[in-house]
Amino acid sequence: MKIAVLEIVEDWLTQAGTHRQHYGRPLVSLCYAQSLDGSLTLRRGQPTALSGAESARLTHQLRAIHAAILVGVGTVLADDPRLTVRHVSGPDPQPVILDSRLRTPIEAKLIRQHPRPAWIAATEGAEPQKRSALEAAGARVLSLPAGREGRVSLCDLLDRLGEMGIDSLMVEGGAQVISSMLSQGLADQVILTVAPVFLGGLPAVEAGAIGWLRLGEVLYERLGDDLVACGKLNRTDLLSSNRP
């Protein structure tokens, strides 16, 4: 029997092409796992395995139905992920690394082992030598304007991805990327796995990043010992959440 959460997300993604035509950017899904107390990992830079086997399989199914997948450079440095589809059959999504200052190592698995050349989103002021080295290793560097705190403007990145034909984007983390997507009103839906553990570690959403947000059209599903919740985020609510 197909997982109900997967069916819901597949149905949402049938609207991705229309979404891109209307907004000029991909439909964005935040997909991540956290502990009962809202932690992504024990401490920054130290990966912590949270998902059980069944919810990990769901993650790979979600990768296979999204056109692209995004992580921040902190996740690359800490986890060295491949972001490929392995536990199920399906196409690998286009990997995108949010890396304002081009800190991605050329030895990273996303550079050396992914079947698709990684797209690295950097600021226009990133060092040309680092850009040349990454491109020589096979990556494609996207030069984008700087936004908040000198980091890549997420709005400009999503617009660029839309121009490049990406209809749907799966965002896996880390905490800074998740918080920024929420605080800037750029996420459209959330697929959240809650593992039955307490960590007291790095929160998934940074303190003060957002106001009060509520998911709509919510579905809960138990996978093994994990609880998966999915729902839509209202764009108007997201944009108004930080207003006084």
Image: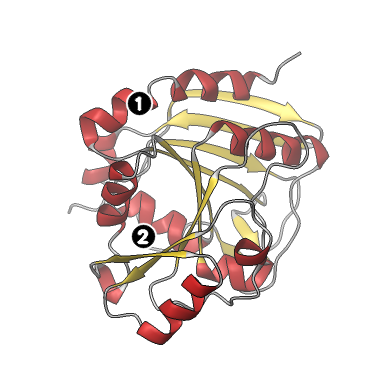
Instruction: Tell me the crowding category of disc 2: few under 14, some 14 to 19, or many 20 or more residues within 10 angstroms, Cα based.
Output: some
Q: Which residue is mark 2?
A: 209
Residue occupying image coordinates x 31% and y 42%: 162
Instruction: Tell me the crowding category of disc 1: few under 14, some 14 to 19, or many 20 or more residues within 10 angstroms, Cα based.
Output: some
Q: How is the image coloured?
A: secondary structure
Residue occupying image coordinates x 74% and y 46%: 51
Res 22 seen here? yes
Res 43 seen here? no
Q: Earlier along the polypeptide chain: callout 1 or callout 2? A: 1
Query: In this picture, is 31 found above or below 62?
Result: below
Q: Dividing the picture into quarters, in which one does residue 79 lie? A: bottom right
Q: Amino acid at mark 2?
A: Ala
Q: Secondary structure at mark 2?
A: loop
Q: Quadrant of the N terminus?
A: top right
Q: Position of residue 208 (x, y in %)?
A: 36, 62
Q: Position of residue 98 (x, y in %)?
A: 44, 63
Residue occupying image coordinates x 38% and y 21%: 15
Query: In this picture, is 239 found above or below 38?
Result: above
Residue lying furthest top: 1
The one nearer the camera, 223 or 84, is 84
Q: Which residue is mark 1?
A: 17
Number of marks: 2
Q: Dividing the picture into quarters, in which one does residue 42 lie? A: bottom right
Q: Quadrant of the C terminus?
A: bottom left
Q: Position of residue 243 (x, y in %)?
A: 19, 52
Q: Amino acid at mark 1?
A: Gly
